Image (cartoon, rainbow, N blue to C red):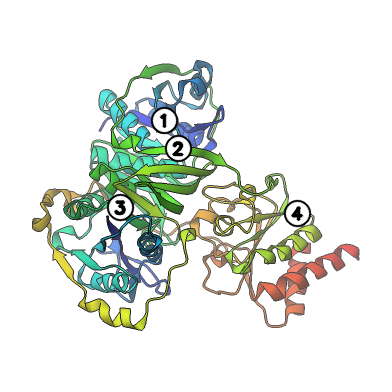
């Protein structure tokens, strides 16, 4: 199997995605062990991808960056670009950091190249000159290892699995590639990208977060979280389900397509603890969960779990915290 | 137009899921149900039909799986599908994502749908990806995790949350769309629909009926070999309080927080 690794690097608004840069670091490390090279690929409007910006991926471990002019923000043009670059250059692996677009591109690439794919990967090892990908399965209760039987192996990381480590690499060589975009890849068109819904709130700098999920039952119940957050001196965060439902602003969202946080205290109210949420907050120092469902997955990784009705517990907890602070 | 909805049978959420150590495959015995995410896809198809912007001639539920998967199809039909297709063949057992996507795309190609809908993920495999695999095989545009979908002049106007906020994307049909659970609130089937579901047409297909190449499916035709199953590093179990007397509960919580200097 070929030893070079191609990493997709997502960019937006003049900056590279942190998870993508993490994948470049991981790709650089793995290619080194395999005795190959790590290359990056960027896809989009060339005006947003100047030479100086592209060359910086060298710092994270890529020796070369392929730049392809194609529509931005959608998966299928990137599948066209990566399939072309891989077939021209013979890469053995395609690697993606965590994130929605990476899942879509990796899946499309697997079909296009008749390649094996593994998603939600948390670590990659080199064995017998090949990459072996590890992924947690069954709500993280077990870990499975994937070995590839295809010419190309597709590896899609879990959010925050690969750390972006700035190494001593220099500038990456920027190589422009012309790619014929498939007809059907142009059948999806971006109308509006990156719309922010709801107020702009800052949750990333808070030491204490009180997060609300669907278990709150209605938008108005966020008041319970706000009162407790105020008493604790923290901020309020939310799950994707309640943000999509319009109960709370997108800027407060934790998880796969939201923010990643690691506060001193993360208090989750009415949150089941789905993987997509967990990946954005599992680095928190102390996790407290309140949920009426004793089977909720969040109790598997909470440091303190309260099985009970949050409508009863939250107001009393707010009062008790206030009393404690006043004493 | 014709809508195909991909559905899947999954172990019931209340059932403990595990890997069969001798085969390395998911132990799929025990209580099964229609993947809850798929009910949103069926509901989305029903809303396109009822929305009136386009004439929907037929909604077809399509699945791949063993004999027992018929129950998931019955459920799909009770929720609104007109008929169903069951791709079932011993040769398919142990298929990975690549092989499953290929086989499903063959079943779909035979139906020639204008729109393929599916749920954003399966409750058991947690893959999120099968829609994009199928779309590439069918040479159709695709979008996943869609939370709003309107038919406008032969195109779909879709909204979804991506890395940097909400995206609005217009998609030309035929297309493959995977829907998030925020897209709708699925209806409950009527008793009449449940009783009638078994009488609706169900086509059973084997790989030979759909020109599926046997060496591209099943365990042997898969491109990924999974194994070495092991437990994750042990984590100290957290403390659990069952709330009976709330005053007492919050007292314990405050003490816990205070101990860790969080108040």
> Which residue does the image show at 23% across and 41% down from the upper left?
A114
**Between B169 and A123, which is closer to the camera in this rendering?**
B169
> Which residue does the image show at 21% across and 78% down from the upper left?
B199
Of discs 1 and 2, which sits in the foreground?
Answer: 2
Is residue A155 something that shows in the picture?
no
Residue A61 screen position, x and y as percent:
47, 26
Residue A6 screen position, x and y as percent:
37, 30
Which residue matches tag 3?
A: B115
Contact between labelled residues 2 and 1, with CB atoms less than 8 Å apart: yes
Residue A50 screen position, x and y as percent:
51, 18
Q: Residues within 10 Å of mark 4 (few under 14, many from 20)?
A: many
**Between A116 and B52, which is closer to the camera in this rendering?**
B52
Is B99 drawn above or below residue A126 in the view shown?
Answer: below
Contact between labelled residues 4 and 3, with CB atoms less than 8 Å apart: no
- Circles 2 and 3 on the same subunit: no
Of discs 2 and 4, which sits in the foreground?
Answer: 2
Which residue matches tag 1?
A: A71
């Amino acid at each position: 199997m070929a030893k070079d690794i191609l990493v997709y690097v997502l960019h937006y608004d003049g900056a590279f995605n942190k998870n993508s840069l993490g994948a470049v670091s991981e790709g650089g490390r793995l290619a080194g062990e395999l005795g190959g090279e790590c290359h990056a690929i960027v896809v989009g409007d060339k005006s947003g991808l100047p030479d100086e910006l592209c060359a910086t991926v060298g710092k994270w471990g890529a020796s070369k960056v392929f730049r392809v002019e194609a529509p931005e923000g959608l998966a299928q043009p990137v599948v066209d670009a990566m399939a072309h670059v891989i077939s021209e250059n013979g890469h053995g692996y395609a690697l993606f950091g965590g994130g929605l677009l990476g899942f879509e591109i990796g899946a499309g690439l697997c079909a296009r190249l008749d390649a094996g794919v593994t998603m939600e990967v948390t670590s990659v090892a080199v064995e017998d000159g090949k990459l072996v990908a590890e992924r947690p399965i069954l709500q993280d209760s077990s870990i499975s290892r994937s070995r590839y039987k295809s010419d190309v192996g597709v590896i899609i990381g879990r959010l925050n699995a690969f750390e972006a480590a700035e190494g001593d690499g220099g500038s990456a060589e920027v190589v422009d590639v012309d790619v014929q975009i498939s007809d059907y890849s142009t059948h999806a068109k971006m109308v509006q990208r990156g719309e922010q819904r709801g107020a702009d709130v800052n949750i990333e700098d808070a030491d204490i977060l009180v997060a609300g999920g669907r278990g709150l039952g209605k938008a108005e119940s966020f008041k319970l979280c706000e009162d407790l957050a105020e008493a604790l001196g923290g901020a309020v965060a939310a799950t994707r389900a309640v943000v999509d439902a319009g109960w709370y602003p997108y800027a407060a969202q934790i998880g796969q397509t939201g923010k990643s946080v690691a506060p001193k205290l993360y208090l989750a109210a009415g949150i089941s603890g789905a993987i997509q949420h967990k990946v954005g907050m599992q680095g928190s120092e102390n996790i407290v969960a309140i949920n009426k469902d004793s089977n909720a997955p969040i109790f598997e990784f909470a440091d303190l779990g309260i099985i009970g009705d949050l409508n009863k517990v939250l107001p009393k907890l707010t009062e008790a915290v206030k009393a404690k602070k006043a004493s | 137009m014709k809508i195909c909805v991909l559905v899947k049978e999954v172990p019931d959420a209340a059932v403990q899921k595990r890997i069969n150590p001798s085969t390395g495959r998911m132990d799929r015995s025990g209580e099964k149900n229609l993947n809850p995410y798929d009910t949103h896809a069926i509901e989305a198809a029903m809303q396109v039909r009822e929305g009136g912007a386009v004439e929907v001639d037929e909604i077809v539920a399509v699945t791949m799986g063993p004999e027992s998967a018929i129950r998931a199809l019955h459920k799909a039909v009770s929720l609104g599908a007109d008929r169903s297709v069951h791709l079932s063949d011993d040769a398919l057992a142990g298929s990975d994502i690549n092989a499953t996507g290929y086989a499903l795309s063959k079943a779909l190609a035979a139906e020639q749908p204008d729109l393929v809908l599916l749920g954003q993920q399966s409750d058991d495999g947690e893959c999120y990806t099968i829609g994009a695999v199928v779309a590439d095989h069918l040479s159709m545009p695709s979008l996943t995790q869609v939370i709003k979908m309107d038919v406008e002049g032969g195109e779909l106007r879709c909204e979804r949350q991506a890395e940097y906020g909400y995206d609005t994307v217009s998609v030309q049909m035929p297309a493959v769309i995977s829907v998030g659970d925020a897209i709708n609130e699925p209806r409950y089937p009527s008793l009449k629909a449940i009783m009638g579901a078994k009488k609706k047409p169900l086509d059973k297909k084997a790989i030979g009926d759909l020109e599926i190449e046997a060496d591209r499916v099943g365990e042997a035709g898969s491109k990924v070999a999974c194994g070495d199953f092991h437990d994750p590093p042990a984590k100290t179990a957290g403390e659990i309080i069952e709330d009976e007397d709330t005053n007492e509960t919050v007292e314990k919580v405050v003490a816990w927080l205070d101990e860790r200097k969080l108040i």
